[in-house]
Image (spheres, rainbow, N blue to C red):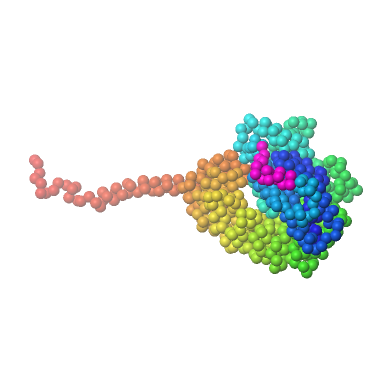
């Protein structure tokens, strides 16, 4: 436990043991780098043994403090390295490739931190043998070389994934690309692809509240392509099953439901998909009935389930809803009161958590900070930890620390709540504990890191519709708008994600508009760097459906930007821009906006969107084309009416000229001229 004598030595030994424990199977683009990192940590095994051996002997307090100071940086670096190894083992393989730059930065950061921790290491203070010292120095030399040499993954590998992700490949080469990627990513079976889907879900769920948006949609598209490819290679999987579902008009019609959207038990479209201990996903009602019947195995794999925890599969639920919308099908309604999962917490894990909760209650600020930090890490690691920590009664204790004068303690507490909130049942516990005002307090007054994580927590809680109302009524929205304006890049993303979720509720739209969100969003939309463009367009789309929002957007001269976005934005941004334009082109100011859209030559990009956009984008484009066409016909009719009126006026003018403007003396010869006989 941090803060006890010899804590750093124990942390070093525990990290080395964890790296040497086995189970580190790396099947992704960074296999070589991950194996090298785990090997270097394992080489410190004898060093860890001598550290533990030294702790068993007598030592004075002064020497213990010196050991603590000497080993603390190495302990921190090794724990960071373990986090990276876990990411490589458990993380989504597709996501890790697409995030290549960030992943490589993590590698470089971990290697640099390890190398720095071993630089000028005070061996004399640790009673380390010469033989072990030589081995540690060997590891240091390897890390120094690795720090100086960037070890890049396969470029062809990265480019293949990127080409499929961005649809920038030659269609004739698609099968070759899919074959290469399936082999390199080890996604050659439906089981592999299912595990990849689950890994993607877990990374999104623990991603700090960031709204994945188009990113997840594209990665899911990649998974679908690979699944189709694998199924083509294995025809015995059989053809898709046809089912009748209700369309948006309440009429039944036959549809092919993707296999991954069907419950393996009922073979029906899943309403509330949940993940069991084996990693398989089922409809909640079906798997609960299976478990209630006394079964202890997974229906799909026949593996014995180590626990009965059911974790909501948010990513799959979102994809099912998108598929329903795209196919004009009524989205499935899920149960609002799922049964609470049984905890899988072992007695030793519960004892450790109870000890940490005792520290949270301590009057020693150091102990409180240390315990909050450890709970934060435990809650981040997996779903079982989140359940166990909440069951032990951590939520009220963490809430009490949100008002701590120690900003670091406050940050650990709000981040622990963020990680706990990933589990759906914990959301209800956090809300019912009256947490929102305290989280908003941190959002307004905490450190920048704490403010960002407070925003992410509000995003996570606002996934439940009824909580959108609760959060919106606590002053959270103006504080999120401030963070969107002045936060770091990550803070702005967290604030934008939370604002988007909250503004889905109509009552919160007015609050956001009055807090000054529209000018801020328009600034992001016109930002030449394109930062937060996706988030800004999504928010603009939902605000444009509110009368105040439509007026505020219209006052910002948005039409040229929206027309450009419809023509050259990403698929999601094009559909959102069309949705905003459609709202603007209805109501009091519609003629002004329609005329401006005509000046900006909107018809060509609209026609292209109607042909090649997303399903929602096509619908919006068609409606907007109809509205523009009526406007153009009306304009043409008005012009023709004016021309006709002008043409009819010309004879009348001529008659008036003949009657009034020609002098009478010209009608007969003037008497002053002589007449010719």
In the rendered image of this protein, does residue 456 appear above or below residue 647? below
Q: Residue at x 59, y 59 (%)?
A: 486
In the picture, measured across the screen, residue 458 lies left or right of residue 677, that is right
Residue 295 image point, x, y percent: 89, 46
Q: Image quarter for residue 540? A: bottom right
Q: Is residue 143 magenta?
A: yes
Residue 54 image point, x, y percent: 83, 55
Q: Residue at x 63, y 30 (%)?
A: 172
Residue 144 in view, yes or no: yes
State how many labels appear: 0
Magenta highlight range: 137-154
Residue 46 image point, x, y percent: 81, 47
Q: Is residue 554 magenta?
A: no
Locate the N terminus and report the quarter of the image it occupies.
bottom right
Q: Residue at x 68, y 49 (%)?
A: 112
Magenta highlight: main SS:
helix
Locate the C terminus and report the quarter of the image it occupies.
top left
């Amino acid at each position: 436990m941090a803060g006890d004598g010899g804590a750093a030595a124990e942390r070093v030994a525990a990290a080395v043991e964890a790296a040497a424990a086995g189970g580190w199977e790396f099947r992704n683009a960074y296999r070589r780098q991950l194996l090298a990192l785990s090997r270097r940590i394992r080489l410190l095994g004898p060093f860890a043994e001598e550290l533990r051996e030294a702790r068993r002997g007598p030592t004075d307090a002064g020497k213990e403090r010196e050991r603590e100071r000497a080993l603390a940086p190495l302990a921190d670096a090794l724990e960071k390295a373990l986090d990276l190894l876990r990411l490589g083992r458990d993380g989504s393989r597709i996501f890790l490739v697409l995030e290549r730059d960030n992943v490589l930065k993590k590698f470089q950061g971990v290697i640099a931190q390890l190398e720095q921790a071993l630089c000028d290491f005070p061996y004399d203070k640790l009673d380390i043998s010469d033989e072990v010292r030589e081995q540690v120095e060997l590891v240091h030399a390897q890390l120094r070389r690795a720090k100086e040499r960037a070890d890049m993954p396969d470029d062809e590998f990265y480019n293949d994934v990127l080409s499929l992700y961005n649809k920038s490949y030659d269609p004739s080469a698609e099968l070759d690309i899919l074959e290469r990627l399936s082999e390199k990513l080890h996604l050659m079976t439906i089981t592999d692809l299912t595990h990849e889907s689950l890994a993607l879900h877990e990374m999104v769920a623990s991603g700090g509240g960031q709204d994945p948006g188009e990113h997840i949609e594209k990665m899911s598209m990649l998974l679908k392509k690979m699944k189709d490819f694998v199924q083509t290679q294995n025809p015995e999987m059989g053809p898709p099953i046809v089912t009748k579902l209700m369309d948006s008009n309440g009429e039944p019609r036959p549809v092919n439901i993707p296999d991954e959207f069907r419950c393996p038990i009922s073979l029906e479209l899943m309403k509330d998909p949940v993940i069991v201990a084996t990693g398989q996903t089922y409809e909640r009602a079906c798997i609960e009935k299976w478990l209630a019947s006394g079964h202890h195995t997974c229906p799909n794999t026949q593996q014995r389930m180590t626990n009965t925890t059911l974790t909501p599969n948010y990513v799959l639920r979102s994809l099912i809803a998108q598929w329903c919308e795209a196919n004009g099908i009524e989205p499935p309604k899920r149960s609002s009161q799922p049964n609470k999962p049984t905890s899988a917490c072992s007695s030793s894990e519960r004892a450790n958590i109870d000890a940490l909760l005792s520290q949270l209650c301590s009057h020693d600020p150091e102990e409180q900070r240390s315990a909050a930090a450890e709970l934060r890490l435990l809650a981040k690691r997996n779903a079982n930890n989140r359940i166990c920590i909440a069951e032990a009664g951590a939520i009220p204790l963490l809430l009490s620390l949100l008002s701590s004068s120690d900003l670091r303690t406050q940050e650990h507490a709000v981040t622990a709540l963020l990680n706990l909130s990933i589990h759906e049942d914990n959301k209800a516990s956090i809300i019912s504990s009256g947490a929102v005002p305290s989280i908003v307090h941190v959002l307004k007054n905490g450190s920048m890191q704490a403010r960002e994580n407070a925003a992410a927590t509000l995003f996570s809680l606002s996934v439940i519709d009824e909580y959108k109302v609760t959060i919106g009524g606590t002053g959270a929205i103006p504080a999120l708008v401030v963070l969107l304006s002045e936060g770091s890049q990550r803070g702005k993303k967290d604030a934008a994600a939370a604002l988007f979720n909250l503004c889905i509720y109509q009552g919160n739209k007015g609050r956001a508009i009055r807090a000054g969100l529209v000018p801020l969003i328009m600034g992001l939309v016109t930002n030449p760097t394109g930062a937060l463009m996706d988030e800004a367009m999504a928010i603009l789309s939902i605000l444009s459906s509110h009368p105040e929002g439509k007026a505020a957007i219209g006052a910002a001269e948005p039409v040229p930007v929206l027309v450009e976005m419809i023509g050259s934005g990403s698929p999601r941004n094009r559909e959102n821009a069309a949705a905003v334009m459609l709202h603007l082109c209805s109501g009091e100011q519609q003629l002004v906006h329609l005329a401006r859209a005509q000046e900006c030559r909107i018809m060509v990009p609209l026609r292209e969107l109607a042909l090649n956009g997303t399903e929602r984008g096509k619908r919006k484009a068609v409606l907007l084309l109809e509205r523009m066409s009526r406007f153009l016909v009306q304009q043409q009719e008005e012009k023709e009416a004016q021309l006709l009126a002008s043409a009819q006026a010309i004879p009348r003018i001529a008659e008036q000229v003949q009657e009034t403007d020609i002098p009478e003396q010209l009608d007969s010869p003037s008497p002053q001229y002589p007449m010719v006989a």
